[in-house]
Image (cartoon, helix red, strand yellow):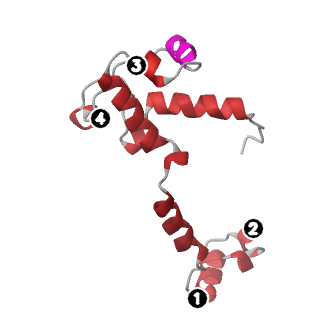
């Protein structure tokens, strides 16, 4: 959408930061906080950008002070990093979306006309 080109190093750093920060929308807390902090309403432990920048060049085993932090890091990596999707789950997803949807195209046409979606009417064959 922003028509911005990102380099591999920028993508890798974003992924690393996303693992550390977690994803509140998906119920994944940051890696310094307990598993249930979003459910119980407990405030998450803050992570400062200075620390993230220092940790970026290190392996998790060196910057995690204890086993709990390391376990939380790997929890977040598994939940947030899309490269961690198991092969069988990935195959099931691809199989599900490779089958064209079944439905009446005349209903789509009627909906687009009724909703005044003229731009989509020109590409109705893609539905």
Quickly name the residue at label 2.
119
Q: Residue at x 54, y 30 (%)?
A: 16
Image location (x, y in percent) of residue 75: 38, 37
Quickly name the residue at label 4: 38
* Mark 4 to mark 1 CA distance (whole Å): 43 Å
First along the sequence among labels 4 and 1: 4
Residues marked 4 and 1 touching at CB (< 8 Å): no
- Going from N to C along the chain, the mark reached first, 2 or 4, is 4
Q: Nearer the viewer, mark 4 or mark 1?
A: 4
Residues at marks 1 and 2 touching, judged by CB atoms closer than 8 Å = no
**What span is colored magenta in the figure?**
49-55
Q: Is residue 50 magenta?
A: yes
Which secondary structure, mark 3? Answer: loop
Find disc 1 in the rendering and name its residue: 104
Residue labelled with disc 3: 64
Which residue of the protein is positioned furthest toward the left in this rendering?
40
Q: Is residue 91 above or below residue 61?
A: below
**Residue 23 seen in the figure:** no
Question: On the rendered image, what quadrant is the C terminus found in?
Answer: bottom right
Crowding around mark 3 (Cα neighbors within 10 Å: few <14, some 14 to 19, many 20+) is some
Percent x, y of residue 121 = 73, 75
Please report whichever mark, 2 or 3, sits nearer to the chain's N-terminal start. 3
């Amino acid at each position: 959408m922003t028509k911005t080109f990102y380099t591999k190093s920028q993508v890798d750093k974003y992924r690393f930061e996303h693992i550390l920060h977690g994803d509140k929308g998906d119920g994944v807390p940051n890696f310094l906080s307990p598993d249930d902090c979003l459910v119980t309403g407990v405030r998450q432990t803050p992570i400062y950008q200075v620390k993230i920048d220092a940790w970026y060049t290190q392996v998790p085993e060196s910057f995690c002070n204890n086993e709990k932090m390391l376990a939380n890091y790997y929890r977040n990596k598994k939940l947030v990093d899309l490269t961690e999707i198991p092969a069988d789950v990935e195959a099931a997803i691809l199989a599900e979306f490779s089958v064209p949807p079944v439905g009446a195209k005349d209903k789509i046409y009627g909906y687009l006309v009724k909703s005044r979606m003229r731009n989509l009417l020109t590409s109705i064959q893609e539905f």
